[in-house]
Image (cartoon, rainbow, N blue to C red):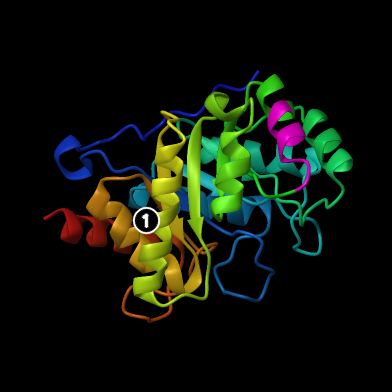
Amino acid sequence: MAMRARPGPARQDEDRWDLVFIKACINGDRLPGEHPALPVSAAQIAAEALGAVRAGAGAVHLHVKDDSGADTLAGEPLSTVLEAVRDVVPDVPIGVTTGAWALPDPTTRTEAVRAWANLPDFASVNWHEDGAEEVAQALLDKGIGVEAGLWHESAVDAWARSPLRDQCLRVLIEVQDGSEPDESVRVADRLLAAVAATGARLPVLLHGEGSSCWPVLRRAARLGLDTRIGLEDTLVLPDGSPAPGNAALVRAALRVIDEERG
């Protein structure tokens, strides 16, 4: 059985870290060629994970890739990646995706999870996707922590009604790409309020993607919430310049958090 992921990192400097936990999301569903440093192979993923952790990340979220560079939930490549990453960051919680784009059929996706032999510490489940309940149950049955991915209010409603709600490891509020900074923050606040209204007592990790990434990360810092950063969420630094890689994004996120928290 896998160990459930810790709610936060093993902090090296409590005064600097305060209560903010940064998770590195190092590749996402991006394809090779979208960024020079995007990790695809097990060795590349391990190297980017190590760099992100050395820069200050307390956990790593990754997407396992097939030979074409597309996301896969197959057990063998998952095992290879987990072994490579744990060789270099053995004490850091490692999470993966269960996104429906990798296996659209809910039954097939659930069966793939149930077939995993080498287990991640946690996995994200997008609660608006068909089969979310079944995938989450399969993860819980294996002792894998479940991050409830909530992209909009209807997903919050579905999760709030779920009998698995309080068994989740954390809530993952994800503000999508395409909004102006102020609107991104308003969306984040609406989703936070909707989650709070459920009465659930779970850690909340707040983050954005694309145009929402840095405004929402700043909002998370101001609120003292956990957050995440990496090439999955953005390819640019806060000033709009290209990000060299995940480590640079983690360092930039720490600077933003320091600014916002004074």
Give the crowd class for mark 1: few <14, some 14-19, many >=20 residues within 10 Å: some
Residue 168 position, x and y percent, is 55, 29
Residue 132 magenta-drawn? yes
Q: Which one is in front, 220 or 57?
A: 220
Q: Classify 172 as above or below 242.
A: above
Residue 103 magenta-drawn? no
Residue 227 position, x and y percent, is 39, 50
Q: Classify 211 as above or below 262.
A: below
Residue at (51, 30) in percent of width and height = 169
Residue at (31, 64) in percent of width and height = 252
Residue 14 falls in image quadrant: top left
Find the residue positioned furthest to the left: 262
Residue 49 position, x and y percent, is 50, 49
Does the image show residue 99? yes
Residue 20 position, x and y percent, is 29, 43
Residue at (38, 81) in percent of width and height = 241
Find the residue positioned furthest to the bottom: 241
Q: Which residue has dot 1 on it?
A: 189
Q: Which one is in front, 230 or 193?
A: 193
Q: Quadrant of the N terminus?
A: top right
Left or right: residue 82 compared with residue 15: right
Q: Classify 67 as above or below 243.
A: above
Q: Which residues are magenta?
A: 130-137
SS for dot 1: helix
Q: Classify 203 as above or below 33.
A: above
Does the image show residue 229? no
Residue at (55, 62) in percent of width and height = 232
Residue type at mark 1: give it.
Asp
